[in-house]
Amino acid sequence: MRVFRGLPASADVPVALTIGNFDGVHRGHQAMLSRLIEAAEDLVLPPAVLTFDPHPREFFAPASAPPRLSSLRGKLEQFAAFGVERAYIVRFTSQFAALTPQAFADEVLTARLGAHWVLVGEDFRFGRGRAGDVAALRALAKRFSVEAMRTVSIDGERASSSAVREALAEADFPRAAQLLGRPFSIGGRVAHGAKLGRSRPPTSACAGCRRSPASTRFASTGSAPRRARRWRASACGRRWRRAASRCSRCSSSTSTPTSTAAASRSSSCTRSATRRAIPTCTP
């Protein structure tokens, strides 16, 4: 599937097009996508979707806009799974919202997208002030035909994004899954916190520090030959003698400290009292 950020300057090929926000891609949206693919095959046209980001309600009333049911990436994955070949993502701005119904039909759908067949929901609104509806779109269409998709009902309930949000707010997950046609899920990027309260002190911020070599692990486990165990490695990658308790980079030397805190007070080299801990070098 090809993804277009914004509208192209001009259409390269005619397309079968559907328009909508597709938040959550519930069973009503899935019926539209299935009908789009069916019509595109009959007309021998590439199936395309025109969607918006951000959601128009987030543009007009960001404080009262409902939470999204799916991310943009999640919507695109659903489009690709149904067989959509082109996805046009239009950023909803004040300039786009100011388009008249005539300009939307002529400039957007005809000139820039090359729509030959258009599928919309029966409650579709477009143009400045939501002035256009399905009847107006049919009247303005000069080079494309318009089909309206009837509302999809599940057990007497209209499948809509609002109904899914209501079910989730009531923790009625079976109902939400029935409206979505799948269990509800949403993806995102994990953000790491401050990681406070760690039991092990952090390593030094020395510019030369890097992962200690294998000889450090051998020295703590005793699996290396005796000659290799004579040396340990500091966090900055320099070698030090266990007896001297210092790395080759530092100038001062002290006896082996009993704890990391004591070592930091008496020398620029520190290591923990346990043999398995990796020593650190304070710059």
Image (cartoon, rainbow, N blue to C red):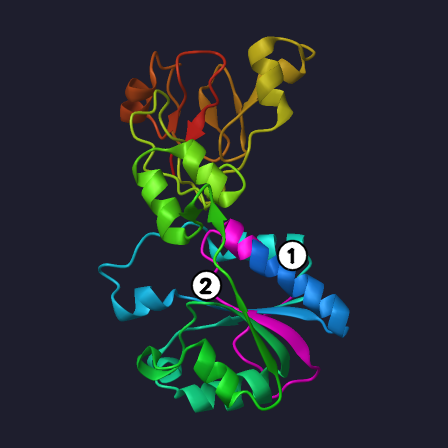
Magenta-drawn stretch contains 24: yes
Magenta-drawn stretch contains 41: no
Residue, disc 1: 80
Q: Is residue 108 above or below residue 2?
A: below
Tag 1 or tag 2, which sits nearer the N-term?
2
Instruction: Name the side, left or right, on which 103 lies relative to 56.
Output: right
Tell me the SS state at disc 2: loop
Residue occupying image coordinates x 28% and y 70%: 60
Amino acid marked by disc 1: Ala
Tell me the tag on residue 98: none
- Quadrant of image for the N terminus: bottom right
Report the magenta residues as a range: 1-30
Determine which quarter of the picture holds residue 263.
top left
Q: Is residue 122 above or below residue 240?
A: below
Residue occupying image coordinates x 42% and y 53%: 160
Q: Which x, y percent locates residue 206?
A: 42, 41
Residue 105 visible, this orientation? yes
Q: Which x, y percent locates residue 168?
A: 35, 39
Amino acid marked by disc 2: Asn
Q: Nearer the viewer, mark 2 or mark 1?
A: 2
**Disc 1 residue crowd, few under 14, some 14–19, many 20+, Cα 10 Å:** some
Residue occupying image coordinates x 66% and y 52%: 81
Instruction: Name the side, left or right, on which 217 lies relative to 68.
Output: right
Q: Residue furthest left?
A: 63
Determine which quarter of the picture holds residue 125.
bottom left
Tell me the tag on residue 21: 2
